[in-house]
Image: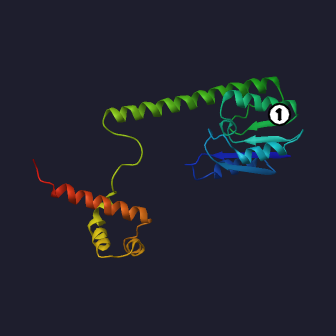
Amino acid sequence: MKFGYIRVSKDEQNHDLQADALKREGCDRIYTEKLSGAAKSRPEFDKMREQVRRGDEVVVWDIDRLGRTTLELIMLVDEWNQKGIRFKSVTQPLIDTTTAHGEFIFQLFAILSQHERKRLILRTKAGLEAARARGRTGGRKKGLSARYEQIAPMVRSAYGEGRTIREIMQAFSIPSSATVYKIVSASRQATASAARPFN
C-alpha cells in the first residue's frame, strides 16, 4: 500500500501541488497536516506511522515535509528500512531507500535540506537586525490602518452618541469589537495629544 504525507506550514494556504503529485504517484491514502515543521506534535504523521507495514511505501513531495532535523530523518528512514517499508521523495527521484546508493543520496539531500533551512533562518534574522538598525521593526505596524484612521472621527462620534458596538461594527464594516475599541482609544489619544499645550 502507498501512503502519502503532506505538510504545509500555517501561513501556506494551498497544498494542491503536493496533493496532485502524490495522487500521480498512486498513493492509496494521503495524510495532510497544516503546521510548522518545528511543531512538536504531528497527529496526522503519527497516524500514518502507525498504519504503515512491511511492503508499504511512504511518499512525500520533498524530504523536508517529513522531518525537522537531519538526524530525525535518517533515524526514521532507517527504522522503515529495517521494517521493510520503502520511502520515496517526488522531487528527489534518486532517493530509493531499498539500495545502499539510495540511502546515501537520501542522507545527502537531508543534510542539504537542513543546511538550506538554517541559511533561511540566518537571512531572516539578518534582515530583521538591519531593519531594526534603521528604526523599523518586524510584524504588523502599530496604530491604525489608513482606512481606520479615516473613519476614526465618525466612529468616535457614533460611540459618543451611545450607539452600540454591534451597530458601529455593522455601520462601518468593522470585523470585531476589539477593533472598534482600538479606533475609539486611538482617536481619544490623538485628540488629547493635539489639545496638550506646548511648554
Horizontally, is 193 left or right of 53 in the view?
left
Horizontally, is 66 left or right of 139 in the view?
right
**Residue 111 versus residue 159 in the image, above or below:** above
Q: Where residue 175 appears, x then y in whole percent?
A: 44, 66
Residue name at image x 47 percent, y 31 percent:
123
Q: Where residue 152 appears, x then y in whole percent?
A: 29, 65
Horizontally, is 86 left or right of 17 in the view?
right
Q: Where residue 150 appears, x then y in whole percent?
A: 28, 64
Q: Quadrant of residue 5?
A: top right
**Residue 147 versus residue 137 in the image, above or below:** below
The residue labelled by disc 1 is 80
Number of residues whose C-alpha sits closer than 10 Å to that of mark 1, classed few (under 14), some (14–19) or many (20 or more): many
Residue name at image x 27 percent, y 61 percent:
187
**Residue 140 versus residue 186 in the image, above or below:** above
Q: Quadrant of residue 109?
A: top right
Please tell me whether mark 1 sits on a helix, a strand or a loop: helix
Residue name at image x 24 percent, y 57 percent:
190
| Farthest right residue in view | 54
Protein image colouring: rainbow
Amino acid type shown at disc 1: Trp
**Residue 150 versus residue 129 in the image, above or below:** below
